[in-house]
Amino acid sequence: MPPGRKRRAVYDAGSARQLPGVLVREEGGRAVRDRAVNEAYNTSGRMYDFMSRTYGRNSIDGRGMRLDSSVHFGVRYDNAFWNGSQMVYGDGDGRIFNRFTGCIDVVGHELAHGITQHEAGLRYQGQPGALNESFSDVFGSLLKQWVKKESAARADWLIGAGLFTRRIKAAGLRSMKAPGTAYDDPIIGRDPQPAHMKDYYEGDEDNGGVHINSGTPNHAFYLAAAAIGGYAWEKAGRVWYAALCDRLPPESSFSQAARVTAAVAGELFGRGGRVEQAVKNGWKQVGVTG
Ligand code: ASN
Ligand code: ZN
């Protein structure tokens, strides 16, 4: 494969909601005064490098797609998202949320949505939607671990550590190691994520709980990676990446993801071997498989 080249561009939406906004930094351009711009530029570059060096992937679509980001979207906007062709970041309201570009795993999460769109295309509803969310958390967390050179044992497995302001009682937005424990606060309430299928959310909110039920596959990944040990992106991450790219259809269920990741683990690291066993155990411990 020819070595890929990064092509980044960062736009300033200027507190409007019109995208992309004004171009403020392009590939190779110097740092600007605006922190959000530099964070979006630098961290999307880290994600590009991570995916390229660990999985041989050339950008979001695998074919060198431009990495476009808009910052300062809306006024005190409390979110970040992938809109189907670019990343978009709010500044946060400063009361509950800080800047969304400040968290490396949040940036990785949004970029990973682009990868999922170009690979498995997991439908953003119910179980495939929760898997879509979970893959974004997995690769967002792995980006952070890769940048910090952290083993599975050392990593915090939090998504969005530092995203909440100090007045909120929160370690982060989500915990892959202990879903349901990321926050507990009078203003924002309690982390609703289930670590186990017995607490599966069946309601209609959040596209059928895509950001809620993602806790369960997140935890399965964590358990597998922790059991395997070492750097999580090397084995568990490689298995999840191959499943996302080559095996999972848009309507995948959790049990399908369990079957496919176990099969891929066997193919990549030895049938019946310890990686396959760790993956199987992970899904079993969260109640997806019996
Ligand atoms: N930040 C959220 C996410 O990437 C935005 C959304 O609800 N899609 O999942
Ligand atoms: Zn997401």
Image (tube, rainbow, N blue to C red):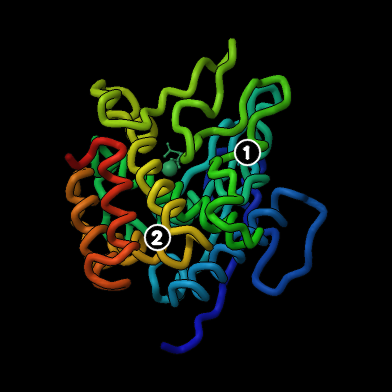
x and y percentages locating residue 70 in the rendered image: 59, 51
Identified by mark 1, the residue type is Ala
Please state if 202 lies on the left or on the right of 59 as rendered.
left
Is any atom of residue 84 visible in this view? yes
x and y percentages locating residue 136 in the rendered image: 43, 50
Indicate which quadrant contains ligand 2.
top left
Please report the residue visible at 73 percent of the width from the left and 70 percent of the height from the top: 29
Disc number at residue 276?
none
The quarter holding residue 194 reads top left
Please report the residue visible at 52 percent of the width from the left and 15 percent of the height from the top: 189
Question: Which residue in the protein does label 2 denote?
Answer: 236
Question: Could you tell which of marks 2 and 1 lies nearer the N-terminus?
Answer: 1
Please report the residue visible at 33 percent of the width from the left and 43 percent of the height from the top: 217
- Do the residues under discs 2 and 1 have CB atoms within 8 angstroms? no
Please state if 235 lies on the left or on the right of 251 as rendered.
right
Q: Is mark 1 within 8 Å of ligand 1?
A: no
Is any atom of residue 251 visible in this view? no
Disc number at residue 161?
1
Please report the residue visible at 39 percent of the width from the left and 66 percent of the height from the top: 238
Please state if 175 lies on the left or on the right of 122 as rendered.
right
Q: Residue furthest top?
A: 186
For mark 1, give the secondary structure.
loop
Q: Nearer the viewer, mark 2 or mark 1?
A: 2
Quarter of the picture holding the C terminus = top left
Identified by mark 2, the residue type is Ala
Q: Label 2 to label 1, Cα distance in Å?
A: 22 Å
For mark 2, give the secondary structure.
helix
The quarter holding residue 259 reads bottom left
Front-lying residue, 195 or 36: 195
Front-lying residue, 260 or 84: 260
In the depicted structure, whether residue 121 falls above or below residue 290:
below
x and y percentages locating residue 122 in the rendered image: 26, 50
